[in-house]
Image (cartoon, coloured by chain):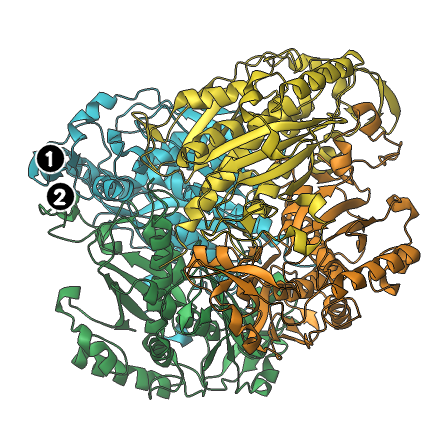
Chain colours: A cyan, B green, C orange, D yellow
Amino acid sequence: MAANSLGKILQLTTFGESHGAAMGGILDGCPSGIIIDFEAIDRDLARRKPGQSAIVTQRKEADAVSFLSGIFEGKTTGAPIGFVIQNGNQKSKDYDHLKDIYRPSHADYTYDQKYGHRDHRGGGRSSARETVSWVIAGAIAKQILPEVTFKAFVSAVGPHQLDQDSEGFDLEAIEHNNVRAPHHSWAKEMETYIKSVRKQGDSVGGVISCLIDHVPKGLGGPVFEKLHAQLGQAMLSINAVKGFDYGSGFEGAKMLGSDHNDLFDEDGGTKTNYSGGIQGGISNGAPIYFRVAFKPVATLMKVQTALTKEGKLAKLEGKGRHDPCVVPRAVAIVEAMSALVLADAYLMNRTTKI
Amino acid sequence: MAANSLGKILQLTTFGESHGAAMGGILDGCPSGIIIDFEAIDRDLARRKPGQSAIVTQRKEADAVSFLSGIFEGKTTGAPIGFVIQNGNQKSKDYDHLKDIYRPSHADYTYDQKYGHRDHRGGGRSSARETVSWVIAGAIAKQILPEVTFKAFVSAVGPHQLDQDSEGFDLEAIEHNNVRAPHHSWAKEMETYIKSVRKQGDSVGGVISCLIDHVPKGLGGPVFEKLHAQLGQAMLSINAVKGFDYGSGFEGAKMLGSDHNDLFDEDGGTKTNYSGGIQGGISNGAPIYFRVAFKPVATLMKVQTALTKEGKLAKLEGKGRHDPCVVPRAVAIVEAMSALVLADAYLMNRTTKI
Amino acid sequence: MAANSLGKILQLTTFGESHGAAMGGILDGCPSGIIIDFEAIDRDLARRKPGQSAIVTQRKEADAVSFLSGIFEGKTTGAPIGFVIQNGNQKSKDYDHLKDIYRPSHADYTYDQKYGHRDHRGGGRSSARETVSWVIAGAIAKQILPEVTFKAFVSAVGPHQLDQDSEGFDLEAIEHNNVRAPHHSWAKEMETYIKSVRKQGDSVGGVISCLIDHVPKGLGGPVFEKLHAQLGQAMLSINAVKGFDYGSGFEGAKMLGSDHNDLFDEDGGTKTNYSGGIQGGISNGAPIYFRVAFKPVATLMKVQTALTKEGKLAKLEGKGRHDPCVVPRAVAIVEAMSALVLADAYLMNRTTKI
Amino acid sequence: MAANSLGKILQLTTFGESHGAAMGGILDGCPSGIIIDFEAIDRDLARRKPGQSAIVTQRKEADAVSFLSGIFEGKTTGAPIGFVIQNGNQKSKDYDHLKDIYRPSHADYTYDQKYGHRDHRGGGRSSARETVSWVIAGAIAKQILPEVTFKAFVSAVGPHQLDQDSEGFDLEAIEHNNVRAPHHSWAKEMETYIKSVRKQGDSVGGVISCLIDHVPKGLGGPVFEKLHAQLGQAMLSINAVKGFDYGSGFEGAKMLGSDHNDLFDEDGGTKTNYSGGIQGGISNGAPIYFRVAFKPVATLMKVQTALTKEGKLAKLEGKGRHDPCVVPRAVAIVEAMSALVLADAYLMNRTTKI
């Protein structure tokens, strides 16, 4: 119910503003008895972290998580897992110039319309700093489903799109290039493009694709609990996301049924997978795959026209350290949100049959 | 929480299988004091109804709704609105041949995997017959927000896509052609195409666009209650939907930030609307627009290979009366789901400030 | 979330006003594969039914339930179970005199304050007619937990209280006297008292005790999901209920810890059961028992002073057919609500361990 | 939904074990624009604090709360309020002797049955240390409803019960005696009794009454959102609580309707208030009052028989610093939970009418 909670059985509730004291959350409903792999959490945090490469923001954030509860002697107890990440390097002075100004295509104006006032430091609650908590919770969710693999990667940066289908990708390549594309030469090209965009003080959008394999059959439900609708909601919750499709997606809308239907094998598998691993909202055991579209980030290192609180247009100079393109870092977020959705659906599915 | 509920304050819970006794639902949280326009409900039902034109299924469904509670002397009382639609013309015999067989790209196989057995008559709970209840509830939701306009229309059928932007559409045309496209000559072309697909016993996908105008500012929330994420979840709950994007959508992923940012006017409006009326998850008062991709329906009037419960492949003949393309009828469903999401967000937003 | 829903996994949502077209509900989250015992449902309905004996209301209500979904060939499918009970014999004319008047200690005044207007016919949504849906859903919930026994009974009528502890009761006697007391001579005395109260046109309160045995260990949770807090909320939802205590209850507040602590047996059982089968909010396998206090019903067959909408005091004559004491019929309701809570906790508990 | 969340619009989610790193929570849904009175929060914390007088536990807990988000420049922003209380003085060594033992009438056994293992240090998640977070959140909730007054007090300690009705109490006295009874000579008697119980190494139960005045009309709902059912659930969530009644309560069950009905005054008020300020589940503007029964705490400073994990009975010596009677400190908890329930109902009620 609450506006800052995600999930039903496995429920993440978060708090924090980019320049407040700390970010953090509570992961409730995590089953007892899981021996937590803390290094796996740190690995996912490192993939999301600012400053990790030349093509992402050079902000320094330590992103050290403290677990305050729910884990005893290395094992989950069934109690809620509280965690906190201090916002060490706040530099909120950097944002004083934004106090009475609404930046274009940010949440500044709408936030003020909704709440009557706002925390202007770096976007406050609407900042993507929030996603640090999601990555932590998602890394735990992955450990609820150790057999399931989550592989997100960058499939487009601006006009540069991978033109191969998922079969041709080299998933091993993803973590070996700065862009996190599953193809070294494409990655090179994308990186060059991002650098040129940055040099202009501009930003650019992109697309992340995600492949989830070894999914148990039967997750999700036929009506308002469709697995892909839950995935869609989770992805559309990520900052800057503008679209989601799964399986054949928007391309599927162009197809004929006789081409689109996935014919069965005798073992219940299918010869094709336009369904994207989900039929009637329920997983069928085939790989789930989907795409997530990210707009270019709104913060530019250029002069833009902004709106003052008094209703005047004003020049706003770009300041600070920002991502010219968020998708390389957002790969970890897409995986985390996928894992939260699937682990929740997995636990919910335990209640289905007598 | 429940798998068959949608919404938080305004909550729709539904029941029913396509060939059971009845469909129906409970709309809880509807404010008291609304003088219900029953004809408006019937008008929306008529737009969803089978048999309404030559290019949709020729099934006969009366779709007469009985309201059982929550409305007294024509006005909502604040009590939950219970309603039922009898499934008059059930013809469940038509489905006896499906008892031990899984149709390709239907929910038959996954439903059986999840629940251990199933109602094989016409898809049971996974049938799009379910959406009749959504249209009823959505028509009431529209009356919670009388100033908001919801205009969904068909923007693509198979490869036939409208090539104009939303400015050029003729919204008046929508209800004056069988396809529900906002352009008469395109509609003609699409209709001809659907007829040819039907003649082949095949089906085809399509895209519905939706334009919501006169939206109050401040609806939605910055984190897990983003207005577009709620819309996405609602749209992805509609049968056969494979994708959702809003504002600039997947195209926005190709753009530069300097092109994509919506610069302000002095009144808080924006010169462009790539944001699609939502910034940081919260409505900014500009028109909300989004696209919904539908796959081709899985039921074909052709012989296909299906899977038997015993794990054998078997020939399955197409039978019954089905839509060659669902988008003309789904327009009413897209609007209904939009209205449910917006009315819920509107009520929730009343609790925001002290 | 919704105001007319109870439960998390197993969730009952209801609708209906006492003199509207029908009562009904949707039971969502019921596991698939239960062979429904319809006679057991009817037996529980008969125990709640008006007109069943000389000491309850003589209204005639058929209380025939129609199941509209979720059960196929006698077995639950996992789909939501929709059901309806027609309000055949409505006699809403009987209530015309109440149109502009607020009866004392009814919901008339508060309902009008909250909603701005009301359905004045027999209490509308606030009528105990609502509980017919709870009994139906509860009878299904009992079938989710076939090994658990639910035994509610009348332990006090006005000043007449059973002075024995639960050990001395004859649970077999309950369904063999009109009062539903577990003791024939006490039942006789209570019945005589109720008849004398009715003769005076008055009403009287009472207490129902409930004993739940063979409860699995581990149901409930340590903080906001305490099993007794869920039971308390469910019982306090029943019309006319003023109090709830469990185990040692209010008497326990007078005791010393050294007397109250339940010492263990070696098998994990306890020598005493002041805990009432629940420790730290979680069932320990011992019998759960609790008490529910009912006030005297507010409708009297006497002249009373009421308030008009215009703010004048006015004489109101008692009319219609009402219960002088609700507890004999409410026994079935207490059991039903208990079963809904326990079945929900049972399903939730499946998600606890990895 | 989550097991560690309370409330619908105003939702508190908590974490923490008594001897873990910290306690804390997230208060979501708090309206923006409240100027937080931090001293009021500290005052309520001080009333709950160990070591505050000679008749409560002498443990030292600093109970300093850090707010991490949701408050900017002293004012709520509408963002979730995250807060943490460090568990400074943990002394978990004190609990090593409990590692393999289940204490009688504690949650040790049930927790292990449910989760498969447990944090044995001081009760872990089931400890009443948890309530520190509730008092913080409740103190904020009070500030959402500044006109409403919450006055809880001790009305019984063991066999010592106040024999006056609420009219005769001196509410000013409450905070001027160690017991928090609204009557100085009764308080004296109760204090003497508690001291004698402590001297014996024993504990004793008690009753807290609560009086809530200046409540807006219309809070709560007629079916599963009854205001008293929400209060009951909240009170039954407090550690050691065994019962709840409101208005006439269990005494009301003995009364005749003609005595119990609250006759109206012309202004909509009532001459008596057996209803306890709530009719049909909805507040009527009269004072809300209720009672909460607490059992004696299970930890004794005496030798008791406990159960080992291996199923042997064993002598267990009392150790540590514990409350001989919890009610003097629990007064602050009862008020906090009341405020959370009422503020939530108040916000929810804003969505009722069109």
Q: Mark 2 falls on what kind of element?
A: helix
Q: Where, by quadrant of the figure, is residue B337 drawn?
A: bottom left
Residue A59 vs residue B77, the one in the foreground: B77
Q: Position of residue A226 (x, y in %)?
A: 48, 59
Mark 1 chain:
A
Q: CA distance from mark 1 to mark 2?
A: 8 Å
Q: How many marks?
A: 2
Marking on residue C100? none
Q: Position of residue D123 (x, y in %)?
A: 68, 25
Residue A265 vs residue C325, the one in the foreground: C325
Q: Position of residue C328 (x, y in %)?
A: 77, 61
Q: Is residue C215 left or right of residue A211?
A: right
Labelled pair 1, 2 in contact (Cβ < 8 Å) = yes
Marking on residue A302? 1
Which part of the image, by quadrant, shows the C terminus of chain C? top right
Q: Where, by quadrant of the figure, is residue D53 drawn?
A: top right
Q: Residues within 10 Å of mark 2 (few under 14, many from 20)?
A: many
Task: List the residue tagged with mark 2.
Answer: B258
Q: Is residue D120 visible?
A: yes
Mark 2 chain:
B
Up/down of C209 relative to A194, above or below: below
Question: Which amino acid type is marked by label 2?
Answer: Ser
Q: Position of residue C225 (x, y in %)?
A: 62, 41
Up/down of B107 relative to D64, above or below: below
Q: Is residue A165 left or right of residue C22?
A: left
Disc 1 and disc 2 on one polypeptide chain:
no
Up/down of C155 relative to C134, above or below: above
Question: Which amino acid type is marked by label 1?
Answer: Lys
Q: Is residue C231 visible?
A: no
